[in-house]
Structures are given as C-alpha cells and as structure tokens.
Image (cartoon, rainbow, N blue to C red):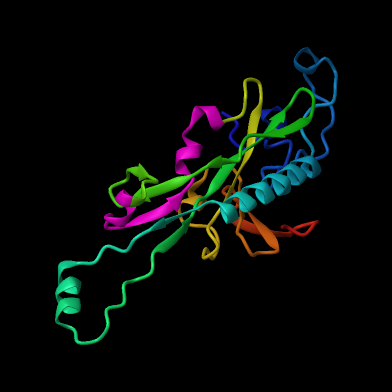
C-alpha cells in the first residue's frame, strides 16, 4: 500500500520528502490508467487545499464549544461546609471541539479534493469517546481528539482517490502536535485558533514544517 501517495508507487525513482511532492511528474508512465492525461497532483494544489481546509476547521473549532460543570469531590464539599468564608463555586470549563478531514488526490486527473471538516469528540481515560457534558464532568480524565474522524469510513476519500494528507484543528490552548498526531501514517497538518500559521508534520522524515496563512484567518 502506498501510504504517502508517491506517484507510480515508485519512491526510489520519485523522491518525495514531504509525502506531498511528485518530483514534477506530470504524465503517467501507464497510459492505460490515465489515458495519457496529466497525473499526480501538484504540491502547490495540495498545499492550497490544506490551507483552505485548515482555515475551515479552525473557524469551526472557534465557534463550537461545550460547557461542563466542575464536579466537587466529597472533601471539597466538606471544606466548603466548614468554611466561614463565602463559597465560590468553580467556573464551568469551556471545551472546544476539534475538526478534521482528508486531502485527496485523483492520480488520473491531477485533481485535488478534500473531505470534511468533520467534528471530533473527546477521548476518556478508558479509551471511550464521548461529547456528553455530564459524562465529561464526571470523567477522571479526557482529551480532545479527532480520532473518531480518522477511523470513520464516511470521512475518508472517495473511491478511486488517494489520501495524501490528514488535517485537523486543536483547541486554542494547544501548543502544537500531540504524540498521537506524530504517530500518523499520513502527513498530518494542524491549525490552532489564534495562530497566524499552520503546521505540517511528515511521519517519514519526522520533520515539522511551518506555513504562514496566505490570507488572514477570521
């Protein structure tokens, strides 16, 4: 399986350090597949589609949040009951949802497309997914995730299309890629609300690249 979308399944002949390049290959060596038409999507088109979809995902993350109440422990309740000071109830936590999708390539036509952005959820410490505020409020631990998107067949590239990258957003408090992100099989892109740049990680070379938005993000 060609996970990194090297043209012609020939990484030895078509060097592709980002997993997005085609080494300027514009015609397929197999006209039976392409009819002699331009094949292999260009790096420029893939990066343009990545930026467009990351912007979309980031804007959705900015506007999609849930509020969960802080559940007090028994000891905290006793402490409050015995306190002579006014009780200050902890403020609810605001959680921003991740969004994600795929960048797809039609290797026969050279056309780049995408899926999503699809809404992520939260992964509990036991591995389950949930976006129920009551469940999250009583959970011992949880993390925002788009893992539910990555395993959803409905979110993947359509028939005949090759996935060339996975993109997603993180909540505003994120500092960058997570360890889980860096375990991706595909090149993975990340956008974060409030940032004027987006990131791309290549799992083959383990290198990270930074791109400034060509237009201001809303």
Q: How many marks?
A: 0
Residue 107: which quarter of the image? top right
Compared to residue 96, the image places residue 34 above or below, namely above
- Of residues 34 and 58, the one drawn nearer to the viewer in this rendering: 58
Q: Is residue 111 left or right of residue 17?
A: right
Residue 217: image location, x then y, percent? 73, 57
Residue 101: image location, x then y, percent? 59, 39
Residue 146 visible in the current orientation: yes
- Of residues 74 and 155, the one drawn nearer to the viewer in this rendering: 74
Q: Residue at x 50, y 38 (%)?
A: 150
Q: Residue at x 35, y 55 (%)?
A: 142
Residue 185 visible in the current orientation: no
Q: Residue at x 61, y 57 (%)?
A: 207
- Of residues 179 and 67, the one drawn nearer to the viewer in this rendering: 67
Compared to residue 169, the image places residue 42 above or below, namely above
Task: Tell me the quadrant of the picture where the C terminus can be found.
Answer: bottom right
Q: Is residue 119 left or right of residue 19?
A: left
Residue 146: image location, x then y, percent? 49, 45
Q: Residue at x 62, y 24 (%)?
A: 158
- Of residues 113 and 120, the one drawn nearer to the viewer in this rendering: 120
Q: Is residue 28 left or right of residue 166?
A: right
Task: Tell me the quadrant of the picture where the N terminus can be found.
Answer: top right
Residue 145: within the magenta?
Answer: yes
Residue 196: image location, x then y, percent? 70, 64
Residue range of the region highlighted in magenta in the rendering: 134-155
Outermost residue toward the bottom? 84
Q: Is residue 81 left or right of residue 92?
A: left
């Amino acid at each position: 399986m060609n996970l990194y979308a090297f043209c012609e399944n020939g990484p030895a002949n078509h060097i592709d350090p980002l997993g997005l390049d085609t080494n300027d290959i514009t015609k397929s060596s197999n006209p039976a597949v392409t009819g002699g038409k331009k094949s292999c999507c260009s790096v420029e088109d893939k990066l343009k589609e990545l930026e467009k979809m990351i912007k979309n995902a980031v804007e959705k993350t900015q506007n999609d949040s849930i509020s969960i109440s802080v559940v007090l422990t028994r000891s905290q309740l006793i402490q409050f009951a015995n306190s002579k000071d006014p009780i200050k109830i902890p403020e609810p936590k605001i959680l921003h949802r991740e969004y994600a999708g795929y960048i797809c390539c039609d290797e026969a036509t050279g056309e780049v497309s995408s899926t999503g952005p699809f809404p992520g959820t939260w992964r509990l410490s036991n591995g389950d997914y949930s976006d129920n505020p009551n469940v999250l409020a009583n959970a011992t631990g949880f993390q925002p995730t788009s893992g539910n998107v990555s395993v959803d067949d409905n979110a993947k590239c359509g028939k005949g299309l090759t996935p060339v990258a996975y993109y997603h957003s993180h909540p505003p408090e994120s500092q960058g890629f997570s360890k889980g992100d860096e375990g991706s099989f595909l090149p993975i892109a990340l956008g974060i609300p409030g940032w004027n740049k987006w990131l791309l990680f290549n799992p083959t070379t383990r290198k990270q690249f930074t791109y400034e938005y060509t237009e201001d993000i809303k």
